[in-house]
Amino acid sequence: MQAAGVSGVVSSLYTYVIALLISALIFCKQWRGVFKQPKSIIWLALIAGWTNLSYVLAIIDGEVMRVMLLFYLSPLWTLILAHFWLKERTNWQGVVIIALSLVGAFTMFWQADALPLPKNQSEWLALSSGMGFALTNVITRYSTHLSIPAKSIAVWVGVVLMSLLFMLFQRQTLADLSFMTTHQWMVMLLIALLLMSATFLVQFGITHIPVTKASVLFMFELVVAAVASYCLTDETLSVREWLGGGLIVAAALFAAINHRED
């Protein structure tokens, strides 16, 4: 998409518009009640829209594995949301999970002459995306009144809206698609289909299984990202970053084990 002069935000807009057009055909019956949906679907669309867009932008411009590990601080945010929003009591295991996550993040970002914080815009986007992902999962899990197609379509609409807002604030313009080749159109269509399937399967999974257990299943993405970034981008992580990432992964695994025992 960059070779065709299409930025990450604009390519996200186009691919999710394609996803919406395809879904309009597949779920045509769902559109009849589009204006009768509860207000919670608006929050789901906005939060999920930011989550997906910020994640894509972080992956495009940042180091893949650092972005992924920051994103997978999401079990930490899930525990905090469950405690303050859902009024679920946090036990000592929850405190251990939070501590592991924070120590892992501190280890990744530690520098002798600087605060242990994300070092660039991509990493801040990844961090905010992980927070949004946790909130999206909590909303999805408890929005039993919404159908899976409705939840999925809400995510796609949210990304389109957030992309337009992002373009407005950055004063970006829509790319001229007449210069795109057939190959580039096919790539964009493939991305849209992959995004559709991923969103639909995530919404189905989160609806039927606990969010803490789902977070562990999502961790397999780290394995795929590690292999892909090594083979395709030649990215490498330092020992400190591997150690910090390992603590974050351990926190997510401990969160799922703790949930099963409860």
Image (cartoon, grey):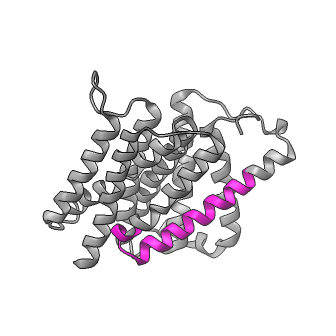
Image quadrant in which you'd find residue 27: bottom right
Q: Main secondary structure of the magenta part?
A: helix
Question: Is 118 covered by the magenta stretch?
Answer: no
Which of 226/86 is in front? 226
When asked about the image quadrant of residue 86, the answer is bottom left
Can residue 49 be seen here? Answer: yes
Vertical placement of 113 versus 127: above or below?
A: above
Q: In this rendering, would 136 be left or right of 55?
A: left
Observer able to see residue 20: no
The residue sitting at the front extreme is 239
Which contiguous range is marked in magenta?
A: 188-214
Using the image as rendered, state which of residue 24 and residue 10 is in the foreground: 10
Quadrant placement of the C terminus:
bottom left
Q: Nearer the viewer, residue 79 or 43?
A: 79
Let me know if residue 193 is in the magenta part: yes
In this rendering, position of residue 9 left or right of residue 248: right
- Compared with 244, 191 (above or below) is below
Q: Residue at x 47, y 73 (%)?
A: 205
